[in-house]
Image (cartoon, rainbow, N blue to C red):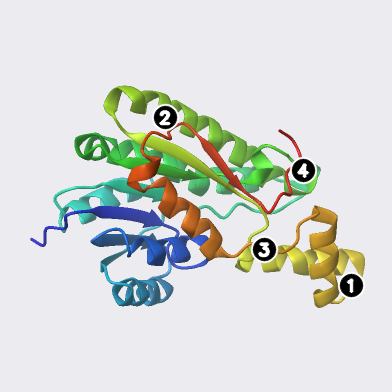
Amino acid sequence: MMVASRTVIVTGASRGIGRATAIRLAQDFDLVVAVARTEADLEDSAAHIRAAGAKALPIVQDLRDPNAASNVIAGTLAQSATIDAIVNIAGAVPQAELLAMTDAQWEEGLALKFHGARRLATAGWPHLAASRGSLIFMSGATAEAPKALLAGVSAINAAISGLAKAFADRGIADDVQVNTILPGAVMTGRRLAMIEHFAASRNLAFKDALQVYAREANISRFGQPEDIAALIAFALSPPARWMTGSSLRMDGGETKSL
């Protein structure tokens, strides 16, 4: 059995913020366990993790499956003596207007982003407690500024933030650090699709829609997945250890509330 001195699990690691985070954390961990549903994309992420200096363990799992979390933990422990951090990023939520969102769309969003993260955090908790490890949840700026056009994302992000607070409270006794990341308008595949829909609704060319969207959000630029990856790397670093139960917003100033 390969024994890694520091191991991190990153879900949603095949694309977007999850991929950027898995690659960035290769600088800080010896083994990066990359979890996603798409094998080809996941293998590409694993190659970049190795190029960045860490060992990579790609695990293909659909976290909507109730058994997936235990499979991820078992697969990790087959290659590592410890689990030092879990970063829950997987979680595409259907984008629909509040009154148009169906029960099936609500259930789909909850199954992956909420229940998938909850199950993995629960399954991994004893191992995080043993290593005095860290747990990251991915929420979003819409948790604090809900929008009718993004009803599912807004509500499920708020639920994730509440779940993370509960885990953080438990973490005080078990010496597990728990924090939540709240990204804003980050340029991922899903964001591109959102802007394409925005462009069509306003009868705008895509390049013009980018400018209008950014102007209406009052941000100077869109975020990049690497911006969020850097924030996560800091949250998992030794200088940030006393920070727990925190909601770390990075949205280019879009959220105007205190």
The residue to which callout 3 is attached is 191
The residue to which callout 1 is attached is 204
Residue at the far right in the pictured view? 203
The residue to which callout 2 is attached is 168
Residue located 36% across and 59% down the image? 61
Residue located 81% across and 76% down the image? 207
* Residue 60, placed above or below residue 134: below
Of the image marks 4 and 2, the number of the one nearer the N terminus: 4
Q: Is residue 120 visible?
A: no
Of the image marks 4 and 1, the number of the one nearer the N terminus: 4
The residue to which callout 4 is attached is 147
Tell me if label 4 and label 1 are in contact, CB under 8 Å: no
Of the image marks 3 and 1, the number of the one nearer the N terminus: 3
Classify mark 3: residues with Cα within 10 Å, few (<14), some (14-19) or many (20+).
some
User: Disc 4 and disc 1: Cα gap in Å?
Assistant: 22 Å
* x then y, percent, for residue 112: 49, 49
Classify mark 4: residues with Cα within 10 Å, few (<14), some (14-19) or many (20+).
some
